[in-house]
Amino acid sequence: MATEQVEAAEQQRLFGVLPNFYSSYVWDAAPLTTKLKFNLALRSATDPVTILSSGFLAGVQQAGNTFPGYGQESGGYLQRFGAAYGDDVISRMLGSAILPSMLRQDPRYFYKGSGTKRSRILYAIAATVVCKGDNGHWQPNYSYLGGSLAAGGIANLYHPGGDRGTSLTFRNFTIDTGGHALNNLMREFVFKKLTTKVPAYSQGKP
C-alpha cells in the first residue's frame, strides 16, 4: 500500500510541471519504509525542476553578487549553482530520508482540508515543527529541523571563506524553516486545486 501511494504521489505536479511529491492527500496513508523515504528524496532531488530551480537561484545570486567570493565570471555562476543545488540536495537527503529513517518519522505533509480556516492555518504552520511518526502519532519534527540545521552547517564546507560561519548556518536554517512554513500554507489552501493526478481516493482529515 505504501509503495502504491508513493508512486501515485510522484505523479503529482502543480500545473502538471512543478513537483508536489511530499503532499499526502490520504490522511491515514501507510507509513513509509526506509527504502521509500530514500527513493522519494532521490526522486525529488534529481527532478529536472529541482535542478532548474537551483540554476535560477544561482542566476539571481549572480545578478545581486550574493556570495561575492565566487566572483562574477562564468565560473562564479557555476559555483553558485553547485552551492545552491548542494544546499537543496543535502537538506532533502538529511531532512527527508536519513533522519526520518533513523528517527522513524514521516517527511510528508498530510493535507487536513477540514475544519475552520484558522485551525487549518495553525495546523499548516505547526507542521513545520511537528510531524507524524511511523507509528501514526504526532511528535516534534526533529528530522526536518535537525536536517535543516545540519545542512546549514555543512554549507560552510563549500561556500566562500568570507561567507562562512555561524551566520551562514543560521541564515540558511531561518530561510529554510520560514519557506517550509509558507509552503505548508500553500499546500493546505492552494496546491491541491492546482495539482494534476491527485488520486481519486484522496481525502483530508475525516
Image: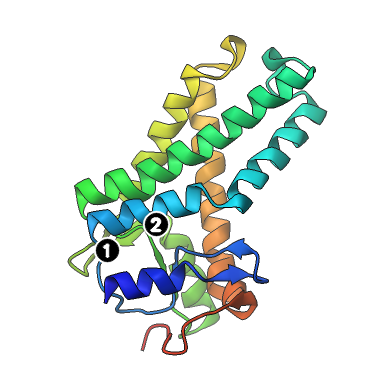
Question: What residue would you read off at disc 2?
Answer: 40
Give residue 131's quadrant in the image.
Answer: bottom left
Label 1 to label 2: alpha-carbon separation: 10 Å
Name the outermost residue toward the right: 63
Tell me residue 169's x, y (percent): 48, 27
Q: Secondary structure at mark 1?
A: loop
Considering the image in quadrants, where does the N terminus appear?
A: bottom left
**Earlier sequence position, callout 1 versus callout 2:** 1
Drawn side of residue 90 relative to residue 63, left or right: left
**Lateral position of residue 58 relative to residue 93, left or right:** right
Q: In this orientation, does residue 145 appear? A: no
Location of residue 70 (image quadrant): top right
For residue 38, above or below residue 5: above
**Residue at image x 37%, y 46%?**
95
Asked if 136 appears above or below 164 in the picture, the reply is below
Give the residue type that dot 2 points to: Leu
> Contact (CB < 8 A) between labels 1 and 2?
yes
> Which secondary structure, mark 2?
helix
Density class for disc 1 (Cα within 10 Å; few <14, some 14-19, many ≥20) is many
Instruction: Tell me where residue 126 appears, x and y as whole percent.
Output: 42, 61
The amino acid on which the numbered mark 1 sits, given as a three-letter code, is Leu
Q: Residue at x 23, y 60 (%)?
A: 33
The x and y percentages for residue 171 are 55, 32
Residue 133 occupies quadrant = bottom left
The residue closer to the viewer here, 130 or 32, is 32
Q: Which mark is residue 111?
A: none
Query: Which x, y percent locates residue 147?
Result: 37, 40
Q: Which residue is mark 1?
A: 32
In the image, 142: left or right of 64? left
**Eyeballing the image, is 58 above or below 200?**
above
Q: Is residue 206 visible?
A: yes
